[in-house]
Amino acid sequence: MATLEGKTRYRIDTDNTGAGIAIMILTTAAFAASDSTVKLIGTAVPLLALLWVRYLFQMIVLGVWQVRRGAFGLFRTDAVKLQFVRAVLLLTNSACTFAGLRHLPLPVTTSLAMLAPLISTLLAALLLKDDVPRSKWAMVVLGFIGMLLVVRPGGSQFSWTVAYPIGSALTFACFQVVSSHLSRVDDAITTNFLTALVATIVLCVLVWMDQAEMLPALAEVRVGSWLLVVFMATMATLGQALMLQALKRASLSILTPFSYGQLAFAAFFSWLLFGQVPDKWMAIGMCVIAASGIGTVLLHGRKPAPAVSTEI
């Protein structure tokens, strides 16, 4: 899913808001293409290998980007522990998303993962003791209704595997909280590089521990599947790069509602690649979740915020 990770210190060019929105829409298309490719790969490639290539690719690209722009402080951070926690949360988020895509239709996984803003509201109220207004609670209830319409507990298609995208939304909500703290002390590209670096190291350890089963499985992977893995990693990293460019041109409050365009792209790719079309109730549920998420963002945007930087 589209991730608004950390904060960038780029100055926003307010004359290019339209371009920022257009780039944000391309961003959602890139993330939807990445998720669609994961589903297309299926079980042909072990999950750990998928994650390893995805974060290794991002680490290399962002590292080169930092060097080319003359920023050599790749490992410079004022919050080592938070950087580690952020990386583990995002890695867990990706693992839940990838696992969900193996078992559930693409639109279902995407729409349930979009519950993250609503879960953030719940976390703010329950853990941080924030004063959440009734209007935001109404959006939470609306999003819960949308989730029920999508998964329909008790229906013939309901499965416990919906826990994967819900877990993805939960970990991403926690990830956003940590990113918010890190945005005040570290550069955005450096933070994303360190996230990819830590995730890659963790995955290297996991692959090494599981090498007895991993190596024989990798030996059976065909060239076509590896090409799809590279394409997936490219689309995910391209999405991150496009998001940086979008946020240089428009504010987060303007761009975030357009991130729900990923639901439309997910439905399109699901129809194009897998012949799966959301039924009436699923489509309504997806729209309800999108409406609740956009409503939550707009309500949050009513609070005055310092015009320093935007989240990515």
Image (cartoon, helix red, strand yellow):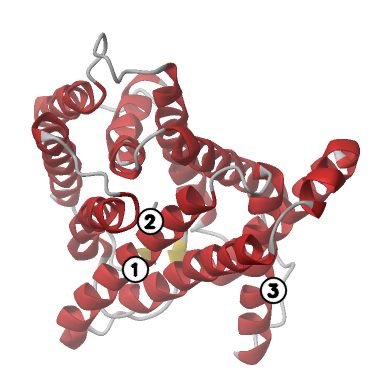
Q: Is residue 15 above or below residue 235?
A: below
Occupied quadrant, residue 311: bottom left
Q: Amino acid at mark 2?
A: Ala
Q: Amino acid at mark 1?
A: Thr
Q: Residues within 10 Å of mark 1 (few under 14, many from 20)?
A: many
Please report whichever mark, 1 or 3, sits nearer to the chain's N-terminal start: 1
**Where is mark 3, residue-wise?**
60
**Where is mark 1, residue-wise?**
27
Compare residues 77 and 296 and report the one nearer the observer.
Answer: 296
Q: Are marks 1 and 2 in contact (CB under 8 Å)?
A: yes
Residue at the spot 49% in from the left edge and 58% down from the top edge = 183
**Where is mark 2, residue-wise?**
2
Please report whichever mark, 3 or 2, sits nearer to the chain's N-terminal start: 2
Compare residues 209 and 3 and report the one nearer the observer.
Answer: 209
Q: Amino acid at mark 3?
A: Ile
Q: Position of residue 26 (x, y in %)?
A: 29, 72
Q: State the separation of the CA atoms marked 1 and 3.
A: 20 Å
